[in-house]
Structures are given as structure tokens and as C-alpha cells.
Amino acid sequence: MNETDVIVVGAGPVGLTLAIDLGQRGVRCTLIEKKASPEFLPKMERCNARTMEIFRRMGLSKKIRAAGLDASVPMDVYVVLAMNEPPLLRLPYASVSQALEEIARSEDASLPLEAYQLISQYTLEPLLKSVAEALPTVTVRYGCEFLSLEQDASSVAAKVLDGKGGMSEIRTKYLVGCDGGASPVRKQLGIKLRGEGNLLHLRQALYYSETLYDRIPLGGGPGRGRHYHVADGQATFLIMQDSTRHWTLHAVVERDEDMAAQFQKAVGAPIEYSMLDVGQWRQNLLLADHYCADRVFLAGDAAHLVIPTGGLGMNTGVGDAVDLGWKLTATLQGWAGPNLLASYEIERRQVGDRNVGASRYASLGRRKWRSQYRPDIRDATPEGQATRDNLARVADIEQRKTNEMIGAELGYRYVGSPVITDEPGGPEHLFREYHPTTWPGARLPHIWLEGGLAVQDLIGPGYTLLRLGGAGADDGKLEEAFRARGVPFSTLDIAGQKARDIYGHDLILLRPDMHVVWRGKQAPDDAVALVAMVTGH
């Protein structure tokens, strides 16, 4: 019988991120994946700003940028009749290099520390796999299928099948299902997904063209960009992948073989290409009733399914992984109280629920402008022109809902968590606007310090007390209370008024994932009680 501290089922980006996070914290972890190796399928395509901040904290952001789309490539979004005709609408968006330049110039807390990165899942997965395999406490087993689990008060026993048909059992203290929307782990637990299922049935195909990107613009068509939405009755949507040589097309068609003609129609000009793969998928807006059952947890698509509009699927899952990773570590190290692991479902399910709502909001926007399509859209008549003008006008409002989700990315805040101080009220949760705040439960906003240092880069791996403005408000009792419980803790002094004015408080207590758990203008009245609460006791 094999033994480990944590089994992670599923080696997509979420499972790999969790395994790396646990491994970097010294936790014995076994990652199992049914596939023999990562597959060359696009699926997710974008790490958003918050995810890149998380990967930066794990030491991976530079590797991911080097592997992903070149920073100079334009990210504009177009609505077109075809790629060789003048666009009906262009929505300009900053390239990675432009976004990073803007961040470097920023003097307040309104921007993230990291810009987004376009990177296809078939690029990201092998990269994360190589990182996980290099960690001494992580065992990576591809070609290993999860079959079933049984748990008792102290452990979980998982039956698995290897690629040669051999069955074995792995015993672990905790198990996490990161095994996708059809999650066998979730089904074993009897947890239901609820919401809106099968909203639209599409096909997705992956293409390779050596010349398409270099030839853009085609005739009078749009310039280089990220997304090309075709104004038709089949929801056709063309996406440039991170190599600029691979493209994906989504459309409502009857047969797999129809996707070749659909690609040619969307491009609109003769082009050499190969169609590498065709699959089917359905739009879903679903949330699991629960994110855990005793010693078994769910993360990523196993817990929430969203429509890709807004780019919140994989990125929400990465947030799940880093929330759960440090809490499992704390529990295994013996300094966490029972409320710490219990807070995982309380915190992350509300984010999953909000992001399902954000995805619905973005998807309804796209459906609204697509509903303006009429069969006369190509007609050289006043009626045809009116159709084109109307669709473009509505898309100029509604399509932005898909591409502008900075509030959902950065502004989420954990409410009602048993391990975060409760301050009545709090800022509104917005999808498209980000207003930096140190309200308990929020992510610490990024600011630059003297010398070009980012405050996030100075936060330690445990709990961190920020002492701002040299006010001397801390009396040292917080450190005593953390040390007495054996909890990793550090203090960071930030002199000067700028950071104090932006953050609004003299003292800010952060947990390992850089979310604020307490803030004050003087030392807490009862440091021992505060430390007990934020560590789950």
C-alpha cells in the first residue's frame, strides 16, 4: 500500500498548481492523472492578472511568460463578417508589454502587479508538469486512473488503476478532486452540480496555419488581434492561440467535418491550413452544492462550471488551489484549528457563485449582440447596412462585458469567513471595475515601494504584519501569540506616508495567500484571541 499526505486527482492546470503549491511547502503529495501525458488541446487560453500574481509568488511567472504568447502581439477584439473584410467593430486592448509598461508607471493601487498572459493549456500543462516533477515531495503519476475512495476519521483510501491494468490502493490524509466537470471524485461523494446546464452545444476545432497570422490583414480585413467574432447565425468565434500558428474555431454546426468549411468561411481568403482536432462542448453555468466532504475536497471545474466568456474558468480554479494548499499545509503541520480547512468551502464557494454570475453576465451580453444578426447582414442595401450598424452598436456595449472583467479578477473578497475579522458593510462586488481596498477578506492591493520594489514580493510565506508609516502602533503581542502557536509569522515595516495613505491603516495582518484578515490603527485589544481566530481555533 502506498501512503502520502495529499492525493490530487487530475493534472489539469488546477491540479498541477495545487500539487506545486503543496510541494513547495514541503507536503508529500501524489498527483494522479488518467491521461498518459498532457494532450495537445487548447481548452483554456489565458492566465488573468490575479493568476499571474499567484504564479509570480510561486516563482513561475517568468517561465509562463517565456512559454506563452509574445508580449508584443496585439490583443484587439474584432466583430467581423469574415477576416478578409472590413471589421464591423474593433475593440482595442493592451498587449502584455503595453499592460506591463502601464503597471510599471502606476503610482496608486488601481492596477495588479502582473498583467495577464495568453498561454494555451497545451503549453501551460507540460510546463507545470515539469515543475511538479522536480519537487522532491511530489509524485506525479500519469496513466493512473482514480476508481473509488473510502474515508474514515483519519484517512482516505483511494483505489487506482495503472496503465497496465493493475489495481492498487493509496492511503492519504486528504484527497482533492481537480478532475473536471464530470468529476468522478464529486460523483463518489454524491455532490450535485446545480444551475443552468447545456445552454448551447458547439463544436471546437484546432487548426494549424503557417501563414495566416503573417498575412493579416487579409485584403481589407481587420488587423492582428486575439479574438475574431463572426457576425453570423452560428455563433462562430475564431481565436488566435499562443504560437500565432494555431487557431481555434467555435461554431454551431451539425457535423465535425463541417468545421473545415466553417474555418474557410470565417477566414474568407484562400489559406493553407491543417485541421488537427474537432471536439464538442456545451455551455454550462453550474455550481457544486458543496466543495468538500470530510477529508475530500473539490477544486476547479469539479466544483464550478462557467461559460468561457470572461475567462473565469481555469483562473477561478487556480484561486481554489492556492486557498486550499496553504490550509492543508497548516493542518498537516499541526498549527491550524478545525475552522481553517472548513473555511475553504465558505470562501471559495462564494467566489465560484460570483464568477458563475459574472460568466452569465458576460454571456448574456454576447447573446444580446448576436441576437441582432439578420440574414440580410451582407446585403448591399439600406436594410443590410442598418443591420450591420445596429449589430456593431450593440456589440460595442455588450461585447465589452466579456473582455473587461478586472473586478471579478482582483476585487473578490471573502465574506463571512470564520478565519477573517468581520467588519460590517464592505465594498460592493463588481465585475468590471476594480477599486482597491484593504477591507478584511480582500487581496492586498499592489503598490510600488521606494526602489521599485513591489510590496507583494516582500510578503513572507506565513502570516505577515504590515506596519505602515512608522507609526509604531504594534505592541509586539501579535508576534508573541503567533509564536506561541508555532505559526509562521513575520513583520514588514514600510516607512513613509504613501503606502499608509493608500492602505488607510497603520497595521494590516495578511495570511499566506495575501488576503487581509485584520486591520487596525492600533494593536488589537486581544492579540491571543485574534490569532486563535485567524488560524481556525
Image (cartoon, rainbow, N blue to C red):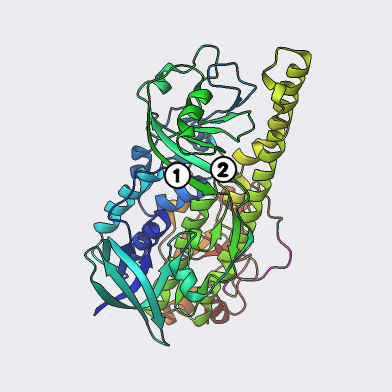
* Residue farthest to the bottom, as pictured: 153
Residue pictured at 48% horizontal, 61% vertical: 182
| Residue 353 against residue 390 in the figure, above or below | below
| Residue 219 against residue 236 in the figure, above or below | above
| Numbered range of the magenta stretch | 419-427
| Residue 338 colored in magenta in the image | no
Toward which corner of the image does residue 518 lie, by quadrant? Answer: bottom right
Quarter holding the N terminus? bottom left
Asked whether 215 or 499 is in front, the reply is 215
Report crowding for label 1: few under 14, some 14 to 19, many 20 or more residues within 10 A (C-alpha): few
Q: Which residue is mark 2?
A: 111
Q: Main secondary structure of the magenta part?
A: loop
Question: Where does the image place residue 139, in percent across and percent down from the top left?
Answer: 26, 65
Question: Where does the image place residue 126, in percent across and percent down from the top left?
Answer: 31, 48
Q: Assign a secondary structure to mark 1.
A: strand
Q: Which residue is mark 1?
A: 279
| Residue 421 colored in magenta in the image | yes
